[in-house]
């Protein structure tokens, strides 16, 4: 299958470039996010070694017997282990699918605000399998800190691509919600053959502001939807993060940009021992941010304003199985 056309953007060239270079990069971002909602990002400052170490520590946890992992089991939105059958992402867009073929370790923002209504869901304490995977906490906490820095710089680039002040989005990320999911996609040999219509992750769009994804290449990998090409494989660069915008960002732009629809293919019978792992950083805005679309001529659709917290919670509820 052909690859979807997604540009590679050098974040270092953006931060250190001339005015002409920065304007060229901003134009390419505007075009890419309007067509597919995706781009590849280099120059983000997160090394391949850091990402590999997180994977190695997480792999040790996922290899444990299920009865051990079950001690950390949570539902979608919780902090801990999401076991097989916990999610079906296709339901977010109204597509009935079997549960996604994956396991996840999920952590996120945990600095309490003092508001129980927020803290009990959005800022709950992270849980760590210290006895079973002693290196995981330190590695993931360092990774999340690096990713937050990269995410804020990405948001400054996105603001410039819309012709807005560079702090247009980051003024709303002083104490944001964010989640980091380590997704393990087991092999056919481990999980068995997929059911009809079953994916590693079913077709969906992300719900929030911006997602920064470090992924591995494989036969059962990421595909992106565009109107021109339909489903097509996402290009891969081991040094790059895959960046896509979510539903809230699309609304914020008045649908100038497209929330990136994507899926992760089921494991291929042609590669029965293939297992992949993705590090997914979902970056949101401050709780209860009012997201109002940019007016014309930047925006295209005058959506009613939404409360970011209520909007995201409803989306998470939609994909929860059981």
Image (cartoon, rainbow, N blue to C red):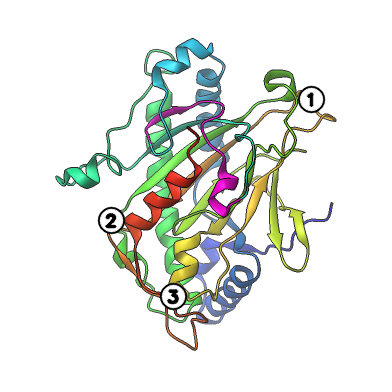
Q: Are marks 1 and 2 in contact (CB under 8 Å)?
A: no
Query: Which SS class for mark 2?
Result: loop
Percent across and percent down for residue 136 are: 43, 25
Q: CA distance from mark 2 to mark 3?
A: 20 Å
Report the residue that reaches farthest toward the bottom: 297
Question: Which residue corresponds to mark 1?
Answer: 272
- Categorize mark 3 by other alpha carbons within 10 Å: few (<14), some (14-19), many (20+): some
Instruction: Report which residue position mark 2 lands on.
Output: 287
Compared with residue 66, is residue 208 higher up or lower down, i.e. above or below?
below
Residue 160 x %, y %: 46, 76
Structural crowding at the residue carrying mark 1, measured as other residues with C-alpha within 10 Å and reported as few (<14), some (14–19) or many (≥20):
some
The magenta stretch is 78-94
In the picture, measured across the screen, residue 248 lies left or right of residue 84, that is left
| Residue at image coords 53%, 11% | 65
Work out whether residue 63 can be spotted: yes
- x and y percentages locating residue 31 in the rendered image: 62, 74
On whether residue 142 falls in the magenta region, the answer is no
The secondary element bearing badge 3 is classed as: loop
Q: Is residue 291 left or right of residue 98?
A: left
Q: Nearer the viewer, residue 138 or 201?
A: 201
> In x, y percent, where is residue 249?
46, 65
State the CA–CA distance, disc 3 to disc 1: 45 Å
Q: Earlier in the sequence, mark 2 or mark 3?
A: 2
- Point out the tag, 1 or 2, that comes first from the N-terminus: 1
Numbered circle sitting on residue 160: none
Q: Residue at x 30, y 44 (%)?
A: 122
Residue 15 appears in view = no
Q: Which residue is mark 3?
A: 303
The CA span between labels 1 and 2 is 43 Å
- Camera-side residue of 69 and 304: 304
Q: Quadrant of residue 112?
A: top left
Residue in front for this viewpoint, 164 or 233:
233
């Amino acid at each position: 299958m052909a690859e979807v056309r997604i540009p590679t953007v050098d974040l270092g060239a953006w931060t250190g470039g001339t005015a002409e270079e920065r304007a060229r990069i901003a134009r390419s971002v505007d075009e890419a996010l309007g067509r597919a909602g995706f781009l590849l990002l280099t120059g983000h400052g997160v090394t391949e070694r850091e990402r590999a170490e997180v994977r190695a520590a997480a792999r040790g946890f996922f290899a444990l017997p299920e009865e051990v992992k079950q001690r950390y089991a949570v539902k979608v939105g919780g902090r801990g282990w999401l076991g097989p059958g916990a999610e079906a992402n296709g339901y977010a867009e109204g597509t009935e699918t079997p549960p996604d073929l994956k396991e996840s370790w999920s952590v996120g923002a945990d600095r309490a605000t003092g508001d129980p209504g927020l803290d009990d869901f959005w800022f709950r304490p992270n849980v760590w399998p210290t006895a079973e995977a002693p290196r995981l906490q330190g590695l993931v906490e360092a990774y999340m800190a690096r990713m937050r820095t990269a995410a804020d710089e990405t948001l400054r680039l996105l603001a410039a691509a819309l012709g807005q002040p560079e702090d247009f989005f980051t003024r709303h990320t002083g104490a944001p919600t964010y989640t980091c999911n380590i997704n393990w996609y087991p092999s056919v040999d481990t999980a068995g053959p997929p059911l009809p219509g079953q994916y590693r992750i079913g077709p969906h769009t992300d719900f929030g502001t911006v997602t920064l994804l470090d992924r591995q290449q494989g036969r059962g990998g990421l595909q992106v939807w565009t109107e021109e090409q339909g489903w097509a494989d996402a290009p891969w660069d081991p040094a790059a993060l895959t960046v896509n915008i979510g539903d809230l960002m699309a609304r914020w732009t008045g649908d100038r940009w497209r929330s990136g629809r994507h899926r992760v293919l089921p494991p291929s019978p042609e590669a029965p021992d293939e297992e992949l792992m993705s590090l997914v950083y979902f970056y949101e805005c401050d709780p209860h941010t009012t997201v109002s679309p940019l007016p014309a001529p930047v925006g295209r659709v005058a959506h009613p304003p939404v409360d970011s917290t209520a909007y995201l919670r409803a989306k998470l509820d939609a994909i929860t199985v059981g």
